[in-house]
Image (cartoon, rainbow, N blue to C red):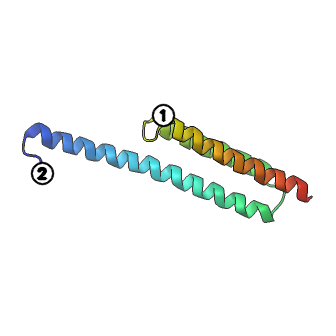
Amino acid sequence: MPVSKSAKRALRKSERGRERNLYHITKMKEAIRLFRKKIEESRADQGKKNELESELRKVISIISHTASKGVIHRNEARRRISRLTKLFNKATQDVGTQQ
């Protein structure tokens, strides 16, 4: 436990930052999880490309925002976006060939 006044203040500050970071990380992971779930559901249901595309844009926005806040590294954000885009392209390509 901190002893000095400034150490106590620093502890409070780091706790607030930790809570903010946790909020952004949780929001991002939840959005990614829901997007992946919608992709899986769309494989059975054709004709949802526009809906998936708008969902992808939202997820990309959340990931970029998390990176801009410094919660995750910008390269991690780019990697996550790239993988989700690749998954989206594969899923929509599969839907197009099944018709």
Under circle 1, the secondary element is helix
Q: Which mark is residue 68?
A: 1
1 and 2 marks in contact (CB < 8 Å)? no
In the image, residue 51 lies at what x, y percent?
Answer: 74, 51
Picture quadrant of residue 48: bottom right
Residue wearing tag 2 = 1
Relative to 64, does residue 47 appear above or below in the rendering?
below
Relative placement, left or right, of 66 versus 61 is left
Q: Which residue is drawn at 83% across and 55% down?
A: 94
Dividing the image into 4 quarters, which one contains the C terminus? bottom right
* Depth order, front residue of 6/50: 6
Relative to 71, does residue 36 appear above or below in the rendering?
below
Look at label 2 and name its amino acid: Met
Under circle 2, the secondary element is loop
Q: Earlier in the sequence, mark 1 or mark 2?
A: 2
Q: Which residue is drawn at 76% across and 60% down?
A: 42
